[in-house]
Amino acid sequence: MVMKSGNIIMDTAKVIRPRIYPKIWDTIYLLTKPKMRVFNHLLEILPKSSILNICDLGCGYKPFKFYLENQGYKLLNYIGIDFSKENAKPDIVLDLDKGSLPFDDEYFDVVILSEVIEHLFNPFHALEEAIRVLKRGGYIYISTPFLFGNHGAPYDYFRFTDLFYKRYFSEKGLEIIDMKKAGSILSASLFIFNLFLWGIFKESKIIYPIVSVINLIGVFVEIILDWCSRKSAFIKRGKEHLYFGIAVLGMKK
């Protein structure tokens, strides 16, 4: 894979690019953009002078590897793990539902689980393994959908809330550094409408300007709600009541 000026030149570009460089015309823009803000918070913490060991569980085509390299990070080891080589480029093929990671305790500086644990029938096993191989003082990044239709069938089992992450991280000795919900009770309908339109018009170029307008409305709605939520606790609770995804960055104490 070749990266140039933030653009990925490869056969799988259409799969990878929206995950790390979401554009306003992408149907998942409202979902992905806030999650990437959390990942970028990780980059603000990690010095570029560091040579990092990173484990990407459920790596797919390893979009975060190329994102990190494009940002100037030196990676000692970037180990991608997935359950097969179909639609993925793992370094290690492993069933994360039950397999043990073939690494010593506290080996990695960063562990990534992006859009993966909802697809595991036994996600707690994978989370336990992720925490085991993470160094003390190391960082874990997790992102999951919430208000989102079945996908990756037949492997789609769970949705996770911010309340889950707060309790789980606390019980496992992880400090939450950052956590963001994607969307709100108002923009959720716009996001779902985008997915609906994509299903109908995905073969037509007309979808791109339509999705762009809907996403711009969603961005404007979120700006207004953010401003209003600072003025009213009631609006803040309402804004956070419904969302379509979440990302969390934690540090192992």
Image (cartoon, rainbow, N blue to C red):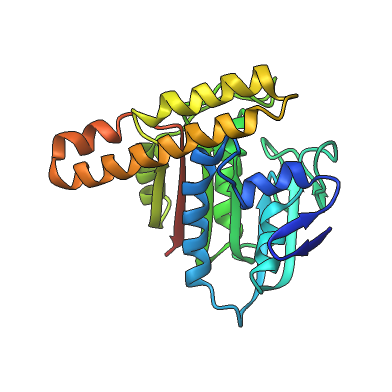
**Image location (x, y in percent) of residue 214:** 48, 31
Residue 64 visible in the picture:
yes
Q: Do we see residue 60 in this rendering?
A: no
Residue at (46%, 63%) from the top-left corner? Answer: 41
Residue at x-position 40% and y-position 32%? 243
Farthest top residue in view: 200
Q: Could you tell me residue 169's position as x and y percent? A: 41, 49
* Above/below status of 235 relative to 7: above
Residue toward you, 194 or 127:
194
Quadrant occupied by the C terminus: bottom left
Farthest residue in the bottom direction?
Answer: 49
Query: Looking at the image, which residue is at 56% across and 29% down?
Result: 210
Q: How many marks?
A: 0
Between 230 and 136, the one lying in front of the other is: 230
145 or 10, which is in the foreground?
Answer: 10
Residue 60, percent from left and from top: 74, 44
- The quarter holding residue 219 reads top left
In the image, is 231 to the left or to the right of 7? left
* Residue sitting at x 45%, y 27%: 190
The spot of residue 56 in percent (x, y) is 67, 53
Q: Nearer the viewer, residue 157 or 23?
A: 23
Quadrant of the image occupied by residue 64: bottom right
